[in-house]
Amino acid sequence: MKINVMTDILEANDRIAAGNADVFGKNRNLVLNLMSSPGSGKTTLLEKTAEALRGKLCLGVITGDVETSRDAKRLRKYKLPVVQLTTGSDCHLDANMITYALPHIDLKKIDILIIENVGNLVCPAGFKLGEDYKIMMLSVTEGDEKPLKYPQMFRESSLLLINKIDLLEYTNFNLKEAKANVRKVNSKMDIIDISCTTGDGISDWIAWLNRHYQKKFGSKARA
């Protein structure tokens, strides 16, 4: 008798994720699953996003790490509702973890909820959380071949943020080649070049958020 354990796990996860999505819909939350390798700049992006959205759209964050609550502490300085999930040995968040986090955050006061996944280029892509969109971040210090080496992450995502473009001249990262590799995996993926350090491209990212919030709910926000 053959038992496909992973299929059973993913099917169970998908059912829980669907329940999360229902909750988010009832609370008028646009939900994004932010994924990347460690050190790509996810938390810095969230800091810049909090600054840019202040007084416009209400941002909330669920952040996942294997250990420590350092990211959550950084984000609370921006007066954001933040929930820290510490996974221990798990290299990704799953839908059940998000369900566990929901009672600890007031979704009625949030327009956009960003789930900062554990830094990993493999596991997070396979687990739905109830999100509207998966967002992939790739930094120029990682290598332009990553879309080909880890295709599922890019295939599952709707937007790619290429971060740290201020460091391009100090790396051998080929921006044109990276985008071509992305297109081989996901021809419909939006791509925005950004630098969370200098602020380049952040306005384009905020415009993407506004556009997709309005697409789902119209222009009315809570801020």
Image: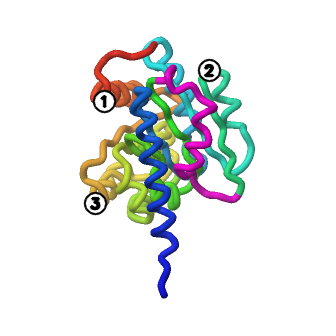
Task: Give how far across and how far down residue 60 sits, in percent.
Answer: 54, 28
State the CA–CA distance, disc 2 to disc 1.
26 Å
State the CA–CA distance, disc 2 to disc 3.
38 Å
Dot 1: few (<14), some (14–19), or many (≥20) neighbours within 10 Å?
A: few
**Image-based side of 189 in relation to 45, left or right:** left
The residue pinned by badge 3 equals: 184
The residue pinned by badge 1 equals: 216
Which amino acid type corresponds to the residue marked 2 in the rendered image? Tyr
Does 165 sit above or below residue 88?
above
Task: Give how far across and how far down residue 91 sits, in percent.
Answer: 61, 57
Asked whether the residues under the numbered discs 3 and 1 touch, taking CB atoms below 8 Å apart as contact, a structural biologist would say: no
Does 212 sit above or below residue 92?
above
Task: Judge depth for marks 2 and 3 and give the one in front.
Answer: 2
First reached walking from the N terminus: tag 2 or tag 1: 2
Task: Give how far across and how far down residue 192 sits, in percent.
Answer: 36, 38
**Image-based side of 105 in relation to 126, left or right:** right
Q: Residue furthest bottom?
A: 1
Dot 2 lies on which element? loop
- Look at the image and give the residue range highlighted in magenta: 89-110
Report the residue at 39% width, 24% height from top: 203
Dot 1 lies on which element? helix
Q: Residue furthest right?
A: 68
Report the residue at 33% width, 58% height from top: 181
State the mark number for residue 78: 2
First reached walking from the N terminus: tag 2 or tag 3: 2
Report the residue at 46% width, 59% height from top: 126
